[in-house]
Image (cartoon, rainbow, N blue to C red):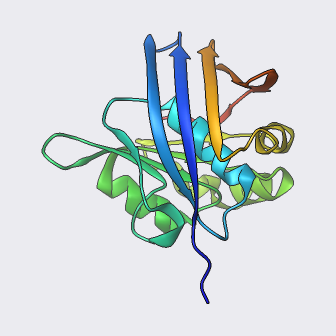
Amino acid sequence: MAQNATIYKIELSISDMDRHYYETHKLTVAKHPSETAERLMVRVVAFALNAHEHLEMTKGLSTDDEPDIWQKTLSGEIDVWVTLGLPSEKVMRQSSSKASKVIVYPYGGRVAELWWDKVRNGTTRFDNLQVINFTEADTAALAKLANRAMKLQVNIQDGEVMVSVDDSVVYVTPDTWKGAA
């Protein structure tokens, strides 16, 4: 029998001083049976970093042709495509042709570094692609915050991210490996 997704109810309050974005989003996030708490929390932080009124979580792991998060224009074109993990060069090429802006958030420490060494040269032609890494220590700390009913406060200033739940605070420092042209 197939396992069902676990539903997380998240109240995400974002104060992004870098983009002057201040909003609270009520998210219902389905955690795929094969998804870890670490990946779930990376997804939530990636959402916060790109927050917009039209940004939304997709089916993610259960579909191959959709990103983890996207933002569409009012006419239905994909404006922002956000992928987590270590996608192939082919996936990055395809997503770069489908969206105005593509952001990949790799994580996993040394594995992510090896992946980037392998695909870096093949990504230079994608002007709309950004690659922003999260360290293994940061994502492990985020995973400890995961709870099925969360009130997260995310503060972003000068590229630094502070994620807090109740009395627990995690500081995340995204590392830009490739910026958009």
Looking at the picture, tell me which residue is in the foreground, 153 or 74: 153
Quadrant that contains the N terminus: bottom right
- Does 143 appear above or below 138? below
Q: Is residue 98 left or right of residue 88?
A: left
Q: Is residue 1 left or right of residue 67?
A: right
Name the spot of residue 18 as percent of width and height, x first: 52, 12
Q: Residue furthest front?
A: 149
Name the spot of residue 75 as percent of width and height, x first: 12, 45
Identity of the residue drawn at 82% across and 42% down: 144
Name the spot of residue 77 as percent of width and height, x first: 21, 49
Q: Quadrant of residue 71?
A: top left
Looking at the picture, tell me which residue is in the foreground, 116 or 55: 55
Identity of the residue drawn at 52% across and 16% down: 16
Identity of the residue drawn at 79% across and 27% down: 170
Q: Is residue 160 left or right of residue 136?
A: left
Q: Quadrant of residue 161?
A: top right
Say whether residue 131 is visible. Answer: no
- Does 142 appear above or below 87? above
Looking at the picture, tell me which residue is in the foreground, 60 or 173: 60
Quadrant that contains the C terminus: top left
